[in-house]
Image (spheres, grey):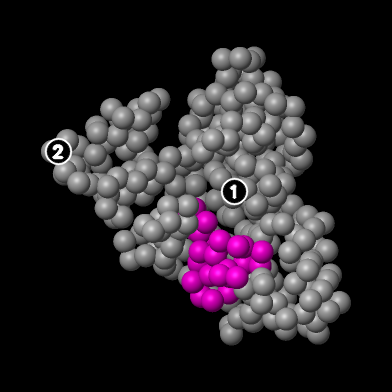
Amino acid sequence: SGKRLDTFLAERIEGWSRSRLQSAIANEDVTVGGRTAKASYKIRPGDEIDVELPTPADERFEPENIPLDVCYEDEYLAVINKPAGMIVHPGAGVSGGTLANAIAYHFGLKSDGMTPGGNRVGIVHRLDKDTSGLIVVAKDEATHEWLAAQFRMRRVVKRYVALVHGSTRENSGEIDRPIARDRRNRTRMTVSADGRRAITIWRVRRRFVKFTLLDVDIRTGRTHQIRVHLSSIHHPVVGDAVYNEGRDKTISNPEIRKAVARLGRFFLHSEYLAFRHPKTRETVEFSASLPSELVDLLDVIEQNELA
C-alpha cells in the first residue's frame, strides 16, 4: 500500500525494467480496477492490477525448424505472412510450435538467444492464433524499440479483411468503444466503459445476401479488438465461436453452413501493413493475399447465394 505502480510492478515482473514498465503504463497496457492509471499511482489494498505486456525483445525462444512464408527480410527486420493456427509466442502452457520458435531458428539464434551478430529477435505486435497474415519482426533491440514506438504513436497502418454475419446498413463506419477484459471470463474481452480506448474503421468491400466482406483498419491494438468491435455492432466475424454467439450454426443455407464448419478458423486476415523503416525512415508497404481456405469459402457463398 502506498507504493508507486511502476515500482510495484518492477519488483514483481522479472526481466522488466522500471522504464519499460512505465512505457507499458503510458501505452495503456496496465489497468488498475479496470481503469488506466499513471505510473505514479499509489497502490491501495485490494487493487486489481491487470498487466498485458508485449513480448520483450530479449526473450529467449528454443529454435524450431518450422517453415515460414517470409514476405520481406533485411538486416533489421522481417515481415512474415503468418498462417492461421500458429500462435505468435509461447505462453499459457505453450512452449513450442510458435512463430517465435520459428524465427529463432530461421534468424540463427544461438542457445543464449543471441544471433551470431550479437542481436536478439523481437516480436513487435500480435496476431490472434486463427488470424492469418502480415506481422513484422525486429532483428535487434534498436529496431524493436523504433517499431514499438511507431505502434504506440499510431503511425503503423494495419488493414485487415473480415467476413461478418449480416448486411451492414452503411458502407463504412467507425467504432470508438473502450475494450476491457471480461470479468466473468478472463479469456474474453468485452466493450466496457472502464476499458482502454479502441478505434476500428471499416468499409464494405463486397456485399452478399447474409454476409458482408469488410476492409478493416485499426488505430489501436487491443486484444481481440476487431472481433469484439464487430460483434458489438451485431456483425460478428464468421467462424468466431467466441464472439459470434452461435451465429454460424444458424446459417440457413446448408452448403454455406457446412463450409463454415469445415473452415476451422474465423475469417480474419491481416492483408496490409505499412510503417517507416528504422534505417531509411521511408515508408515501406506490404500486402498478403487471402489464403486459399478463405477464398474457397467466398466461392461457396457466391455459388449458393445471390450477391
| Number of the label disc, if any, that sits on residue 1 | 2
Q: Residue at x 68, y 47 (%)?
A: 85
In this rendered view, identify the residue nearer to me: 295 or 266.
266
Note whether residue 305 is visible.
yes
Which quadrant does the N terminus fall into?
Answer: top left
Magenta span: chief secondary structure = loop
Query: Would residue 105 appear left or right of 200 to someone viewing this image?
Result: right
Please, is residue 4 above or below residue 132 in the view?
above
Q: Residue at x 33, y 66 (%)?
A: 193
| Number of the label disc, if any, that sits on residue 161 | none
Crowdedness of circle 1 by 10 Å Cα count: few (<14), some, many (20+)? many
Q: Residue at x 51, y 38 (%)?
A: 92
Asked which secondary structure carries label 1, the reply is: loop
Note whether residue 215 is visible.
no
| Number of the label disc, if any, that sits on residue 127 | 1
Residue 23 part of the magenta segment: no
Please, is residue 86 above or below residue 231 in the view?
above
Task: Measure the alpha-carbon separation of dots 2 and 1.
Answer: 36 Å
Where residue 65 sits, quadrant-wise, is: top right
Q: Residue at x 51, y 29 (%)?
A: 57
Residue farthest along the right direction in this orientation: 303
Residue 267, percent from left and from top: 68, 62
Residue 242 part of the magenta segment: yes
Q: Which residues are drawn in magenta?
A: 219-246
Which quadrant does the C terminus fall into?
Answer: bottom right
Residue 34, percent from left and from top: 31, 55
Crowdedness of circle 2 by 10 Å Cα count: few (<14), some, many (20+)? few
Q: Earlier in the sequence, mark 2 or mark 1?
A: 2
